[in-house]
Amino acid sequence: MNKIVYVDNAATTKINDEVLKEMMPYLTEHYGNASSIYSVGRESKKAIEFAREKVAKALGAKPTEIYFTAGGSESDNWAIRGTAMALKKKGKNHIITTNFEHHAVLHTCEYLEKQGFEVTYLPVNEKGYVTAEQVKNAIKPETALVTIMYANNEIGTIQPIKEIGAICKENKVLFHTDAVQAVGNVNIDVVDQNIDMLSLSGHKIYGPKGVGVLYIRNGIRIDNLITGGAQERGRRAGTENLAGIVGLGKAIELATANIDEKVEKVTKMRDYLIENISKIPYTRLNGGLENRLCGNINFSFEAVEGEALLLMLDFKGICASSGSACTSGSLDPSHVLLAIGLPHEIAHGSLRISINDKTTQEELDYIIECLPPIIERLRDMSPVWEKVKNR
Amino acid sequence: MIYTDKVMDHFANPRNVGELENANGIGEVGNAKCGDIMRMYIVVENDIITDVKFKTFGCGAAIATSSMATEMIKGKSISDALKLTNKAVVEALEGLPPAKIHCSVLAEQAIKSAIADYYKRQGIDPTPIVGHIGDCEACHTH
């Protein structure tokens, strides 16, 4: 096979042709500033509102609850910092999250801790789930916000969002979820699932990079993160990323059409890959299999280091990712894998494969063919391997 | 993370991988917790390192530095091998990303550790000759 097998869709996705087609006019002739009074600007304004309606529809929200941002990280920052700052004035200074959130959430919470907020990091279990009961027990009168990811980016585990939302509602605590990985893979309804705020990103759903959304339920007042002009009804300043917003609108429309059908198809492919990779000895699947994103596969191979594995897969044209320290620029392995209780040495040897509905059977078989000899080669080279074998 | 062609060459085709049955010096440094372990096997005859092999658990840079370091000491005298610095290994690889410099430190330490083991087996205290070999934690300062 002389081609690229791209199975890193949890990192980013290839832009959909239809999405790009919709965007192009807004990068060329329709360049008007949406805040302008003349017709060229009005066209832009219309396109943004059209995209807003599409996002609202995909989430079961109202268009007035959708705010465009520069991406998932900004949305997370806004929801958390904005809530913290707004509710601090009311004496609420406590935030509840989990210990395996995306860094956009974790590092924001850590920053707020330095500013005097108290943060509870709920531990997830060994399969990578948190329970509504844990949230309930952590809520106190000072709690301003619960922020828990919809689905984990590394191990794909889907959290009991509706139940957590119900607990928050009961206790009158705001609930934010980072749904960057979930949108397009899970049926989301913010009303039914008791979600007050939700972050999503364009480039994870076959849309463009540099654009995202924060859904904020009507009636919730949080402080602004980006101050300036009156865009986004005065809540998020900055001239709108017109083409990006148009692209995100189209992308979410496509990504949320026929979710059930897509999930069924991709889940089958995922389980086929999991079944076959599991045949490699001294290998473990990270994260529970039930309530898992249909495209997520995450394995640890004992005595193998993740970055070396990725480089060897790259020689074969396979693009995947790892929770190894060496790929993150730090010396610590993935906080997600440590959170589900993996020892450091095993956490270093993880491989994340994220497939989608475009992944072919041929590609799956190619991965299954390439992987075992690479693992064997790295194990032969590894001074740890004999210890693992003789254990 | 961008590796030089030299690093990629030594990673894809590592030189001197394996074990040596007749090794008279074996050194191991690093730990699995920090993600890198290097084990060096050397055969010393008349103060010359006549053969060397390695086994490494670690990233691309760890494997490449092990490979390059073994190439640089093969056929050299012990005193020359002891002069090999991590900087020289990095230069021979035409550079390493800053986060990977610790791999080259590990390679230097692995050689020193194997030579120390050789001296110990000869009944000679290695410390005055090899000096103190820093532990793995030292590389966490990078």
Image: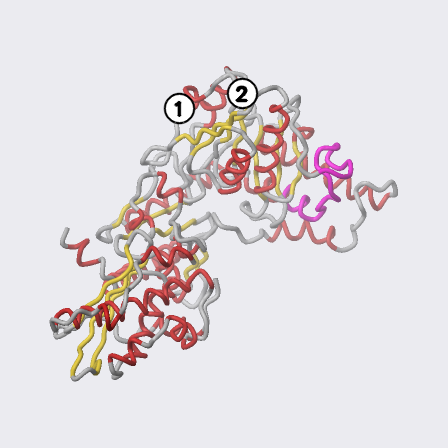
**Among numbered discs 1 and 2, the one appearing first in the sequence:** 1
Residue at position x 47%, y 24% in the image: A162
Residue A83 occupies quadrant: top right
Q: Is residue A241 magenta?
A: yes
For the residue marked with disc 2, what is the amino acid?
Val
Q: Name the spot of residue A266 as percent of width and height, x first.
A: 42, 44
Circle 1 marks a residue in which chain?
A: A
**B11 in relation to A155, above or below:** below
The numbered dot on residue A78 is none
Residue at the far right in the pictured view = A38
Q: Nearer the viewer, residue A113 or A357?
A: A113
Residue A221 occupies quadrant: top right
Instruction: Tell me the quarter of the image containing the C terminus of chain B.
Output: bottom left
For the residue marked with disc 1, what is the amino acid?
Gln
Q: Name the spot of residue A191 as percent of width and height, x first.
A: 56, 23
Circle 2 marks a residue in which chain?
A: A
Few, some or many residues within 10 Å of mark 1 (<14, 14–19, 20+): few
Q: CA distance from mark 1 to mark 2?
A: 15 Å
Q: Which residue is mark 1?
A: A134
**A251 in relation to A379, above or below:** above
The magenta segment is A227-249
Q: Which residue is mark 2?
A: A173
**A103 in relation to A86, above or below:** below
